[in-house]
C-alpha cells in the first residue's frame, strides 16, 4: 500500500523547516510557486529588521566600513560553498540576473574575439533569449538557435564563442547535461555561461569541478531571498584576469574609495561589480542562503525528488484520466524542483486554481507549473492541491 | 545679535520631521553624512516590515499582479512629480546609478551616431568618470575632459554627442548651471545626461521645463531610501521611441509575461528596464520619497540654505582662524546640501571626529564634508559638531 501524504510528512527529515517560514495568508491552501517566488524565512524578516532598525539607523554610514562593502563577495563565498560548489573568491551578488547575464556574456564574448556565434535554445527563459539577441545585435555577432538543448553538441564548432543555457528548464524542469555540454563546448574552444535560476538551492552544483566558465542566477526562487532580490554571478578564477565587463562603475575599481582618475578594474571577481551594493536586499538573501546551508543541499535534493515523484504519482492516478499530459521528465535524475502538467484548458484553469487557494503558475501555451520548494512544501499540501486541481476540472 | 542654534531649531518649520526618523546610535553626537547615506525614516522600517511580513509572506506570488510589476514606474511617477519636476511616464526605478548611467549613456550615444565625443569633467564623481571611459572605449568614442564644469560650453561643437555632468558636485556642492548647459548642448546638437545624486531630494528640479534629455540619480542620500537602494532614471518623453538601451532583459519587453520569441522593447520608459524589479529595496525608497513629498521640496531647499549658511558662519567664526579653508561656494544660490571644509590635516582629523561621534566624510585630498540633510539635521546638532571639530583641532 502506498504511503499516505501524512506518513510522508511525518517521516520527512526536513519537516521542521516548514516552521522556519512566515505564515502564508489564510486563503492559501497550497503554495506551489516557490520556484517563482520562495516564501520568506522568518530569519529574513529578522535580518531585515535588524539591518534597518539597528545597522542603518544606529551605525549609519559606518555600516559600509563595518561589513557592507564586502557583503557582495562575503555572501558570494557563502553561496559558493553551500550551494554552487565554488571555492571562495568566485561569486558576487548584486544587480539582477539580466544585468549579470549581460555582463558575463559580454565578458565571455570579449575573450573569444575571433568567434561571433552564441549558441542557445528557443526554450530558454525569455530574458536569456532577449539578452543574447541584444548582444549579438550590438557586437555584430550571430545567435545560433537550437530548438532543444539536446541539439547543442551538434552545432558546436570553430565559430562558437559562447554557449549559454539554463541548467534546469523553467518550463519542463528538465536538467541539462551541464558537465557534458561544458566539456563539449570547451573541446570546441568555446566558453559556457550557465543560468542557474531554477537550480540554485534545489539541487547540488559543482561549478568548480565541472569547469564551468561563468554562471548567473537569481536568489528569489529556491533561495527565498525576496521579490526581486539581488542575483549572483560566478566567474571561474582562471578567467578573472581576462574577463572584463563593460559597466565600469566605482565598485568594480581597485581602491574604490581613493576615487582616483582612470578606471582600473579589480583583478579578482569584484571587477564584475559596478554600482553600490543593494544592502537591504542582500540581508534577505543572507537569510535564505543560511537556511539552505543549514538544511544541506543533499537532503534538499532528496526531498525534491520525493516531492516531484509524489506529484507524478498523483498525476498518474488522478489527472492523466482527465486528459492531462505530463510536461516534465518521469526520470527523477533529469527532473529539477518542479513538475509541469499540460492541458488544453490550462489558461482558463489556472485563475480558478488561484482563486481556490492553490497558487501555481500558468506557463503558455498549456502548462500548469507546480513548484515544490523542499524546505517549505509539504506532502499533504501537495496532495490537497492536486485534489483541488482534479475537482476543479471535473 | 545672531540667532542661537536653539532659536533656529525652535523656529524651523521642518523641526517636527526630525522625529520621523529612527534614532541614531547613542554614540552619535551629530550625523553630518546624510548626503552619503540618509537616515532611515520610521516609515521605511514599517513599509519594509509590511512588505516582507504581509505582502511577500501572505500574498506571495500574487504580489506581482497586485502592484509589484508596476512599482518601478508608479514610484517613478511619484518621484517625478514630487522631486524631479517630471510629468508621469518618464521616470523608472531599479538597478544602481552606475547601471542606469551605462544604459542612458549608451542610449544617448546611439541617438547621435555621427558624433563620438562625450564631454565630462575631471571633478565628476568617480563612477561617472569610469563609465564614460568604458563607454568611449567600447564604442571607439572619445572623452573630452574638462577640468571644471565652467569650461564645458567652450568645448561643445559638431563632434559632441553627449554632455554628462553632476548637477551638484559631490566634493564642493557647487550647483552646475543645468538650464544653461542643457540649452548650450542642444544648440550644439548634443544630448545631456545629468547625474542628480546630490540634488534629488534637497533642491527643486524642473527636468521637463529645462528640456533635460536623460537623468539618473540614487535614492540613498537625501531621499533616505537605504544603503544601496534602487536608483532612478529619467528619459524625456520625446526620446522614448528612439532611446534604446543595450540590456534587453524581460522587464523591458512588451507583454513580458507572454514570454514570446524575439525582443520588442516597450515603446515607453519601461523599455529602460531589464531584470526583475528589486521590490524590497523599493519599499524603502517609497518611504523616503513620501516623506520628501510631504515636507515639500521648497521648504526643504529653504532649510538647506539656512543650514549650509549657518555652517559657513560657524566656519568663519571658529574654523577659518585655525587654518581651514572653505571648499564650497559662499553664494547659497550655487550651493547644494553640503559644505566642504579644507585642511591639510583632514585625512588624520576625520577618523578622530568619527571616533568622537561626529559622523562626516573625508574626501581626498583635504576635504571634510559636512552633509546637512534638511529633514533630519538640526541647527544645534550642527553647532555641536562644529564645536567638536574646532576643539579636536586646537
Image: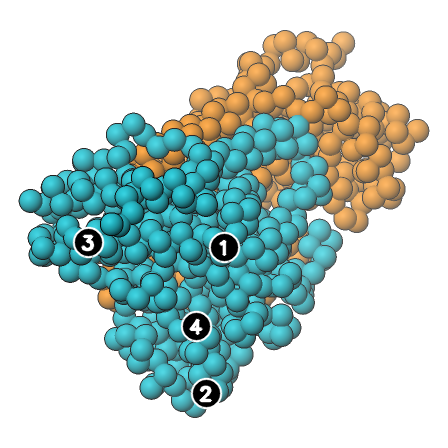
Chain colours: A cyan, B orange
Q: Secondary structure at mark 2?
A: loop
| 1 or 4: mark nearer the eye | 1
Q: Can the viewer see residue A218?
A: no
**Above or below — where is A41 with respect to A155?**
above
Chain on which label 4 sits: A
Please tell me which of labels 1 and 4 falls first in the chain.
Answer: 4
- Is disc 3 on the same chain as disc 1? yes
For label 2, the residue is: A188
For label 1, the residue is: A297
Is there a contact, CB below 8 Å, between mark 4 and mark 3?
A: no
Q: Residue at x 31, y 54 (%)?
A: A308
Q: Can the viewer see residue B325?
A: yes
Q: In which quadrant of the rendered image does the C terminus of chain A lie?
A: top left
- Residue B30, located in which quarter of the rendered image? top right
Please tell me which of labels 2 and 4 falls first in the chain.
Answer: 4
Q: Residue at x 24, y 66 (%)?
A: B261
- Is disc 1 on the same chain as disc 2? yes
**Above or below — where is A212 with respect to A64?**
below
Amino acid at each position: 500500500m502506498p504511503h499516505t501524504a501524512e506518513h510522508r510528512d511525518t517521516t520527512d527529515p526536513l519537516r521542521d523547516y516548514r516552521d522556519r517560514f512566515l505564515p502564508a495568508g489564510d486563503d492559501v491552501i497550497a503554495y506551489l510557486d516557490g520556484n517563482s517566488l520562495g516564501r520568506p524565512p522568518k530569519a529574513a524578516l529578522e535580518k531585515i529588521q535588524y539591518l534597518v532598525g539597528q545597522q542603518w539607523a544606529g551605525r549609519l554610514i559606518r555600516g559600509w566600513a563595518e561589513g557592507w562593502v564586502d557583503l557582495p563577495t562575503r555572501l558570494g563565498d557563502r553561496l559558493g560553498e553551500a550551494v554552487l560548489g565554488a571555492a571562495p573568491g568566485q561569486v558576487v551578488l548584486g544587480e539582477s540576473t539580466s544585468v549579470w547575464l549581460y555582463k558575463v556574456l559580454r565578458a565571455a564574448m570579449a575573450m573569444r574575439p575571433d568567434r561571433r556565434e552564441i549558441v542557445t535554445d528557443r526554450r530558454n527563459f525569455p530574458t536569456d533569449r532577449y539578452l543574447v539577441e541584444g548582444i549579438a545585435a550590438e557586437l555584430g555577432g550571430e545567435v545560433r538557435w537550437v530548438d532543444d538543448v539536446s541539439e547543442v553538441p551538434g552545432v558546436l564548432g570553430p565559430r562558437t564563442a559562447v554557449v549559454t543555457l539554463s541548467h534546469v528548464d523553467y518550463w519542463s524542469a528538465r536538467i541539462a547535461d551541464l558537465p557534458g555540454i561544458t566539456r563539449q563546448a570547451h573541446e570546441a574552444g568555446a566558453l559556457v555561461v550557465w543560468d542557474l535560476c531554477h537550480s540554485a538551492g534545489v539541487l547540488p552544483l559543482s561549478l568548480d569541478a565541472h569547469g564551468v566558465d561563468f554562471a548567473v542566477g537569481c536568489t528569489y526562487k529556491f533561495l527565498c531571498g525576496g521579490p526581486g532580490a539581488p542575483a549572483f554571478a560566478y566567474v571561474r578564477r582562471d578567467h578573472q584576469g581576462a574577463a572584463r565587463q563593460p559597466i565600469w562603475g566605482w565598485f568594480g575599481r581597485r581602491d574604490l574609495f581613493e576615487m582616483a582618475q582612470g578606471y582600473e578594474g579589480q583583478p579578482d571577481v569584484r571587477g564584475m561589480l559596478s554600482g553600490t551594493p543593494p544592502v537591504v536586499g542582500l540581508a534577505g538573501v543572507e537569510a535564505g542562503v543560511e537556511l539552505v546551508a543549514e538544511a544541506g543541499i543533499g537532503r534538499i535534493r532528496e526531498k525534491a525528488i520525493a516531492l516531484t515523484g509524489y506529484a507524478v504519482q498523483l498525476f498518474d492516478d488522478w489527472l492523466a484520466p482527465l486528459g492531462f499530459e505530463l510536461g516534465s521528465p518521469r526520470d527523477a535524475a533529469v527532473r529539477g524542483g518542479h513538475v509541469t502538467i499540460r492541458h488544453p484548458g490550462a489558461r482558463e484553469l489556472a485563475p480558478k486554481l488561484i482563486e481556490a487557494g492553490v497558487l501555481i503558475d500558468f506557463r503558455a501555451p498549456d502548462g500548469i507549473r507546480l513548484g515544490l520548494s523542499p524546505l517549505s512544501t509539504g506532502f499533504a499540501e501537495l496532495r490537497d492541491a492536486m485534489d483541488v486541481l482534479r475537482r476543479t476540472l471535473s
